[in-house]
Image (cartoon, rainbow, N blue to C red):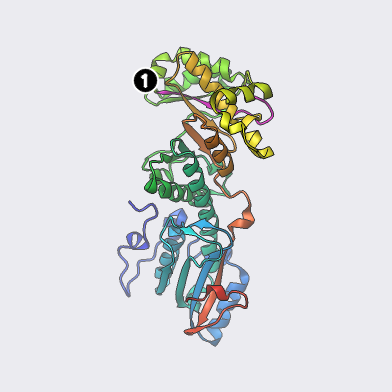
Amino acid sequence: MQPFPKSSELSKNHKKNNIKIIKDNDWPSYLRPTPDQLPLVTDTYFLRTKDIICEYGDTEVTYAIFMRRPVIAALDPAVTWLEQIVKERNGSVNIKRSFEEGSDVGAGEPMIYISGSMLLLVDLETALLQKIGATCVAAYNARSMVDSLKQTSFLAMDARHCAGSDMADLMAYGAYVGSKRVKSETDAIGFIGCATDKTAHLFENTKGLGTMPHALIGYAGSTLKAAKMFHSTWPNQPLTVLIDYFGKEITDGLTVCRSFKHLADQNKLSLRIDTHGGRYIEGLDVAGSYAVLERNAPQAIRGYRTEQELRYLIGTGVSAAAVWHLREILNNSGFEKVKIVASSGFGPEKCKVFALANVPVDVIGTGSYLPSRWSETYATADIISYGGKSQVKLGREFLLRR
């Protein structure tokens, strides 16, 4: 199944001179903006250029698109949108990809060439680039995270951090592409789902995944009561219980395990920690954090570590030591089959540090594969030929086809 259907699949009734126009409200979100919306969201200077071309005549052009940092090619949403818009305009375009989907793309390498009528293409650049940059960076970050923690399952929990559902669709696709890349090369588990139903199909699910937010714990008034409410409402669902609300991760975690021992024994119970970065998990401090890593992953604290790496290892919040601490207590209490789910700031660097400490985390819920520096998401398009003659802005000669 194609994660993003090709335009031909969306427009099977298209014929060469008899195009079926898709109504504005029928367009899937990843194909927005629609033709009617385009003038409102396109840079004005492109619209003015289009008016000038109408006045003085059209020409054939070729665009080259690149990024200034290494990324993973995640271009299907952009290409699908472009193909659909071109069909709606009864035009044609030649698209040449330099890299297969999921491939590494170096900084400055043209990832795609687009050739066609300048009149047809000139006002599409704004929306096209919006679909490329952040998606490719998200794929790069997701690939890095999965590559670091191959035997950990990841959940894409980014929807609430996105600027609208269109961005959420693209970020979920980035996670899919980056994860698929590692899974195709190794035995990695990778991203197994996302938070919303809309993009669940990317991970071969029909529904989004997730259990309980802090809001449910507050509503219930206790961690155990929230767990009982959830299990009563969704008795056939595996139970994942958030245990950090009251700052009693160990106490509440063991209480839940004892109350749901039948689920614990069947590998159907997980404890999730999302401990605030301003405090240690229950029972830990600096000395205790060093001690737990000394017992379980001494190599992690032997070499030189940056200040940020030390925070991930022995700091407050969901550190490597915190997960090891919880795992030790669960095992010593007879709950070896209870899984640990962790969240809170799991980006590429934190995942690398967790790998260094061999942290026994079963599932990571994360929205931190999203680009952290937005300036790194800027995709750039330059025209490299006009009327079949090579011509490009001074300084961009590296984009010319060799």
Residue segment shown in magenta: 268-281
Asked whether 307 or 82 is in front, the reply is 307
Vertical relation: 217 (above or below) 50: above
Q: Circle 1 — which element? A: loop
Residue depicted at 55% across the width and 42% down the height: 367
Residue depicted at 45% across the width and 66% down the height: 82
Q: Position of residue 400 (x, y in %)?
A: 51, 76
Q: Is residue 34 visible?
A: yes
Vertical relation: 168 (above or below) 130: above
Apparent side of residue 66 relative to residue 20 in the rendered image (left or right): right
Q: Is residue 225 visible?
A: no
**Residue, disc 1:** 266
Residue depicted at 51% across the width and 32% down the height: 358
Apparent side of residue 370 relative to residue 257 in the rendered image (left or right): right
| Kind of residue at disc 1 | Gln
Vertical relation: 359 (above or below) 125: above
Residue depicted at 57% across the width and 59% down the height: 69
